[in-house]
Amino acid sequence: MFRIALIICCCSGIAFSQSINIPALKPSVVPFTPVKDQYLSATCWSFSSTSLLESELIRMGKGETDISEMFIARHSMMRKIKRHLQLKGGNFFTPGGQFHDVVWVMKNYGLVPESAYTGKGRGENDHNHGDMDTLLNNIVKYCIDNQITELSNRQVNVVDSILDYYYGTLPAEFVYKGKTYTPRTYCDQYLGLNPDNYLEITSYTHHPFYTRFVLEDKYNWTGDAYWNVSLDDFISITNNALDNGFTVGWDGDVDDPDFHYNEGYASLKNPPVGDQQKARQQAFDSQTTLLDHMMHIVGRVRQNGMTWYYVKNSWGKMSNSAGGFLYMREDYYNMRTVAMIVHKDAIPVAVRKKMGI
């Protein structure tokens, strides 16, 4: 999605480093769709979110589906531009996003299959948004510098033409499996996904547990609220989901020296000991943990008394030695996960009662 520099701080009470043995056992997995490649585009948020929804469709008995990530990214981009201008540049303008951005597109525009919209407007083989992102940033900067807070109809048309050029023209309707759909009818009638069933959940002590708060992160550019639960419940939600046929969206930090993607694993060299909740909060406050990527957890395995999560990335099958996946040990998950996305039915009943849902 995006790479950003970290301010690395050391927590007190550090355990001695341990040698790393990636699990030899095959993880217990929930059905998932093939690994894709976001290539040179800041769209991991869309890839990971659609991957989660695709697993949900398999769970619901709809079979394997390939949802267009770029349909979501294109609609979201126009919204980002308009919102940034309305706020007079007061939020972070970025091609990145979060799961709630996908929900907004679903509710307002629907979804389409990849076959109806590849998002490769120039006929390219891979997604490369470098030129587009630079051009849009320049337009936005010009507007802010000239105190333009709302695009005129002409300016909207100019931005639309740019998006059409790089992403391709959006389909008003399309044929899928012999039937004609609009993005709205495809999402509502064919897919049958209810976006309100999915919750973004985090675990920090600077806000009360079992309430919702606006996560203080620049990539939460819409100012959406996340559920806040204790770390113990955060972990139990994750494990309960994976053990009961659900998958989990992962929102966290990969720009960390202990994230060894090429080797196919992520684990802390020096895991904190003692109060894990306190250590997690300290890492957030000091920006040792930052939100810079989204992935999709599709399974887990226990080895030597430790849980390893099996995580699907969106950097292509050939991007590492594990075919585009990695094993994430529980200590890394507990400290470097900023938030998760999960179907509300995957949350243990006792935790749901605390949340009041």
Image (cartoon, rainbow, N blue to C red):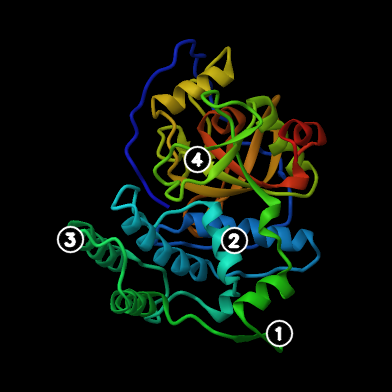
Q: Which residue is label 1 attached to? A: 177
Q: Earlier in the sequence, mark 1 or mark 2?
A: 2
Q: In the rendered view, would you say 33 is above or below 118?
A: above
Q: Is residue 221 left or right of residue 298?
A: left
**What is the CA distance from the residue labelled 2 to the residue labelled 3?**
37 Å
- Depth check: 242 or 22 in front? 242
User: Which three-letter amino acid code belongs to the residue tagged 2?
Assistant: Thr
Can you tell which mark lies on residue 146? 3
Q: Amino acid at mark 4?
A: Gly
Total number of numbered labels?
4
Q: Earlier in the sequence, mark 4 or mark 2?
A: 2
State which tag comes first along the sequence, 2 or 3: 2
Residue 24 falls in image quadrant: top right
Location of residue 10 with respect to 96 vertically, above or below: above
Q: Secondary structure at mark 4?
A: strand
Label 3 secondary element: loop
Residue 28 visible at all? yes
